Image (cartoon, rainbow, N blue to C red):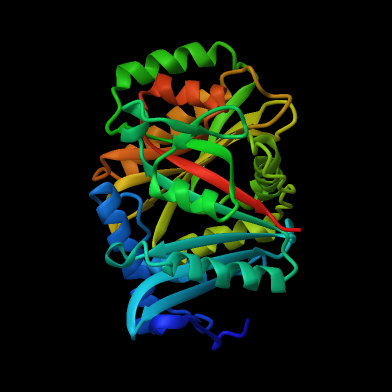
């Protein structure tokens, strides 16, 4: 589908793809700002805050895409009024038979078939790019789950989403199956230092062959190749249920691309890693990111302990080191948010021990074509 093309529906509904974005952020069009504003309004209504929201700078940089993933943005208008949006992500290096889809309709215009029309456009665009597997995600607050509402169980066998949620009805109606559920958890800052010391002492008893090191924003040149190996493992060593994704190939160039995109988006990052004494290789790592534009929230990105180095308390050690650095670097932050597959019991246990509390869930849906 060409960038300027439009889908016209009955009743004055049009769905058009936005032109390719051009940096810097100041070049963002009124249409893209409307796309971003719709997402912000949705997050505010859902969560009551902007903790889960991207800034305009982040959103603008992300949706430009890169050499590893093409990203498309769509706006839906009803008689000229913006009523919804859609997005399509197309991996270009791995997983080239998959596509990510996302549909959002303004609350005042739901239950009129607008979401269905947007999804039809996205699915058709994916088919035209020879994609045969579609993925979609929906994150919501944990309250209905904690209240004991009936759940649709994930195919992974662990976790579920509220059976009567509008998002669940929409996904099932359009042929998507719930493959996996992630738990979103929040840790209040600052963390009690005495508690961290207690956890750290226990983990250090098992980690005598490792040092914990770290960096801010940019991996040191002498470590970037071994860091890239860990980043590749991140895509294969975490639970993915039946989603069937291929592993990602990371090298120094790809690491630097992610780092530069974060900086251009106003995102700061801090990494803690465990380095093996004998080999010098990185055995584990964890990443936290922070936006000064939304200073209250720190986001937990990747955490991984490489096979062959597990059972030494490394996951706990790198997380503790990074929490301390985050508190020093970002004193205005009040919480850390993280996400884990519900079947990832080991990492969830580490987070629970640190004091993370469940705050949300994310359903991971999939539709196979043909």
Q: Position of residue 24 (x, y in %)?
A: 43, 79
Question: In this image, 74 relative to 108: left or right?
Answer: right
- Which quadrant of the rendered structure holds the N terminus? bottom right
Q: Position of residue 110 (x, y in %)?
A: 34, 63
Q: How many labels does the image show?
A: 0
Q: Position of residue 368 (x, y in %)?
A: 70, 53
Q: Is residue 265 visible?
A: no
Q: Is 11 above or below relative to 156? A: below
- Which quadrant of the rendered structure holds the C terminus? bottom right
Q: Is 6 above or below relative to 265? A: below
Residue in view at x 23 percent, y 49 percent: 48
Q: Position of residue 134 (x, y in %)?
A: 64, 57
Q: Which of 93 and 312 is in front in this view?
A: 93
Q: Is 46 above or below relative to 107? A: above
Residue in view at x 28 percent, y 34 percent: 189
Q: In which quarter of the image is residue 41?
A: bottom left
Q: Which of 336 and 111 is in front in this view?
A: 111
Q: Is 324 above or below relative to 173? A: above
Q: In which quarter of the image is residue 292?
A: bottom left
Residue in view at x 68 percent, y 35 percent: 237
Q: Can residue 132 be seen in this view?
A: yes
Q: Quadrant of residue 326?
A: top left
């Amino acid at each position: 589908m060409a960038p300027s093309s439009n889908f016209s529906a009955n009743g004055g509904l049009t769905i058009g793809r936005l032109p390719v974005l051009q940096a810097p952020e100041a070049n963002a069009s009124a249409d893209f700002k409307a796309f971003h504003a719709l997402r912000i309004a949705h997050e505010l209504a859902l969560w009551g805050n902007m903790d889960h929201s991207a800034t305009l700078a982040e959103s603008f940089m992300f949706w430009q895409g890169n050499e590893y993933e093409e990203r498309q943005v769509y706006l839906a208008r009803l008689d000229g009024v913006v009523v919804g949006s859609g997005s399509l992500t197309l991996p270009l290096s791995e997983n080239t038979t998959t596509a990510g889809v996302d549909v959002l309709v303004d609350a005042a215009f739901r239950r009129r078939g607008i979401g269905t029309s947007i999804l039809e456009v996205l699915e058709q665009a994916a088919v035209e790019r020879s994609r045969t597997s579609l993925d979609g995600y929906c994150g919501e607050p944990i309250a209905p789950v904690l209240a004991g509402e009936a759940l649709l169980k994930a195919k992974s066998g662990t976790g579920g989403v509220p059976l009567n949620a509008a998002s669940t009805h929409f996904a099932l109606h359009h042929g998507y199956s719930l493959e996996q559920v992630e738990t979103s958890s929040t840790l209040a800052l600052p963390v009690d230092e005495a508690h961290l010391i207690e956890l750290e002492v226990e983990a250090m008893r098992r980690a005598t062959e490792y040092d914990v090191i770290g960096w801010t924003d940019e991996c040191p040149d002498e470590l970037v190749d071994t860091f890239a190996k860990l980043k590749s493992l991140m895509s294969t060593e975490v639970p993915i249920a039946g989603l069937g994704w291929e592993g990602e190939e990371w090298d120094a160039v790809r690491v630097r691309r992610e780092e530069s995109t974060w900086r251009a988006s106003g995102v700061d990052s801090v990494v803690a890693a465990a380095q093996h004494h004998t080999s010098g290789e990185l055995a584990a790592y964890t990443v936290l990111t922070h936006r000064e534009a939304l200073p209250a929230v720190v986001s937990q990105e990747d955490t991984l302990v490489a096979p062959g180095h597990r059972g030494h308390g490394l996951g706990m050690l790198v997380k503790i080191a990074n929490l301390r650095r985050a508190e020093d670097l970002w004193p205005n932050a009040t919480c850390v948010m993280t996400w884990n597959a519900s079947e990832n019991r080991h990492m969830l246990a580490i987070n629970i021990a640190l004091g993370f509390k469940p705050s949300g869930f994310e359903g991971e849906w999939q539709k196979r074509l043909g």
